[in-house]
Image (cartoon, helix red, strand yellow):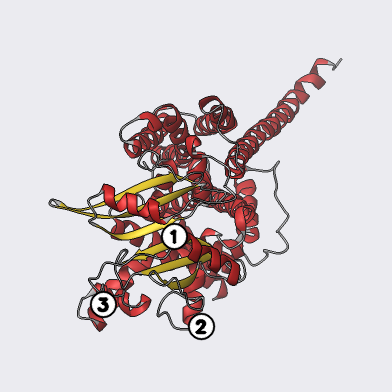
Amino acid sequence: MQRDRLKRINHLHTVVGLVLGWLLFVVCFSGSVAMLYEEMQGWENPSLRSPLPEKPPAINPLIDAFVASHGGHVDNLFLMLPDKARPFYTLSGSVHRDEGNEFVTQRFAATGGTAVLEAEDGPALWLLRFHQNLQIERRLGRSLVGIAGVFMLLSLLTGVIIHRKILRDLYKIRWHRSSHLKWKDLHTGLGVWTLPFSITIAFTGAILGLVVLFLPILALVAFKGDQDRAIEAVIGPPPEPAGIVATMAPLDDVLTRINRDTPYRASRVGLENYGDANARYKVFADTDRELVRFVQVDANAVTGEFGEPSLLFGALPESAIGRVYAAVTPLHYGTYGGALLKVVYYFAGLLVSISIVVGTLIYLERRVNGPLGRRSAGFYLAISRLNAGITTGVALASVTVFYADRLWGMHSDDRGYTTALAFLASWGLAIAVALVFGNTRRTSRRLMSATAVLCLGMPLLDIATAPYALQSEAAFTVNAVIAASGSLVLAYLVSSRARQSAVEARSLKVANAPQAVSSHAP
């Protein structure tokens, strides 16, 4: 009875891995890259790298100039303050035009506050959106990612149940045995070592992805389909404009007092009813003392007075559920421990991605080279080739987009189009190469070698394309992580090749042993 139950659970674990394995890999791998999104924003724009000034410029003139440049018809203003990762101001808002609303963004230098070219989103944001919604329609994409998180939790649970000797086999990897045993040991080891991280990422990812489904259901049940009322019920209603023009309190002074009088550091500001007598500065501050994405401080934009910091957004209740929800985003993106924690998240995410790939290899190896499987050998070989192209192709494409951006995208009129074209073209090319060439292992090694070379060359390209740009802390972090990734891939390829050569040499020695004995026989 126990054996039959374990067999069914093992079958469920296998089915989840096969049906959603590629989706889970794409989401996990792109999520690993997206961990360094904020650092990559400054790194991918060398002209915007600059040291943070001791005395920042007055902020209100920047806002006034931005609003005036769009005819004064701008609302939903949002300001991101400069930091080490993004050493520039980013101001955005919705501009009312006859043909409809348009979302616009402008960046200002941290030193002097001079306006720079209007912001064009580079590969960093594209890869983040690819992780969040697969670059398809937002609700559909985020729902798919959320569903993938749910099934990843199911896969983790079934994996723990079927591996009853996890602790005993935790350090066991039989490198010199069959491919099946080697992949099985590696899959088990990686799965166990990353289990706490995997559960956290899957759980929080499921919540972040499925919230786009929960909100319409909540609005339908409680507010007769009115999603705006449902949102207001959570974050509180915005202040109504008074219709009276008023002078705004200096925002830089308000931020200075918040940084001085509270244990938090302001990082971004929502500007509600800017220029009106009933305006509000909605200040969001970073915190390393509480597991929340931001602390919120509401300030009167006319008087400059501000209230007590709120750990939970708006009207979100001070409860166990409220605290769990507030912790979801920082837990998922590793924003509560600085750049070092993000780097740890990055490499942990790569290990989870490798574990997913290895699980697929275990299934395919027993069918391509073994007796299992109900399909033809050609079918499993085609799936094996497709698996190699999809998995190694995502890694190759994630590096290629930065080359395309530096050499072409930064100078083009549509930077986002360049990124999308480079990613999809390189990924498609990798899949085509894997399908055309027969030896799956050799093709995978070549695609991984190309990825490693591109990673190692990225810091050199950064210096070559921006020789006079400041090598900021964020730029150094990104270059170091990319170079380390390439070095690890290259080290694996070299070591695995050496092990394979040693195995081939031993096999050849064993095969020639009888012949050597017979040649010395009398």
Residue flagged by tag 1: what amino acid is it? Answer: Val
Picture coordinates of residue 116, whole percent (x, y) = 40, 39
Image quarter (top left, top right, bottom left or bottom right) of the C terminus: top right
Q: Mark 3 to mark 1: distance in Å?
A: 38 Å
The residue positioned 27% from the left and 54% from the top of the image is 137
**Front tag of 2 and 3:** 3
Circle 1 Cα neighbour tier, 10 Å, few/some/many (<14 / 14–19 / ≥20): some
Determine the secondary structure under disc 3. helix
Q: Is residue 464 left or right of residue 144?
A: right
Residue flagged by tag 2: what amino acid is it? Answer: Ala
Q: Mark 1 to mark 2: distance in Å?
A: 32 Å
The residue lying toward the viewer, choosing from 295 and 177, is: 295
The answer to whether 4 is drawn above or below residue 517 in the figure is below
Q: Is residue 192 left or right of residue 227?
A: right
**Front tag of 1 and 2:** 2
The answer to whether 177 is drawn above or below residue 16 in the figure is above
The answer to whether 281 is drawn above or below residue 319 in the figure is above
Reading the image, the residue beneath label 2 is 320
The answer to whether 298 is drawn above or below residue 34 in the figure is below
Q: Earlier in the sequence, mark 3 or mark 1?
A: 1
Mark 2 near mark 3, Cβ–Cβ under 8 Å? no
Picture coordinates of residue 483, whole percent (x, y) = 61, 36
Reading the image, the residue beneath label 1 is 16
Residue flagged by tag 3: what amino acid is it? Answer: Arg
Picture coordinates of residue 31, whole percent (x, y) = 48, 52
Q: Is residue 74 left or right of residue 309?
A: left
Residue 443 badge: none
Reading the image, the residue beneath label 3 is 229
Q: Can residue 360 be seen at all in this image of the molecule?
A: no
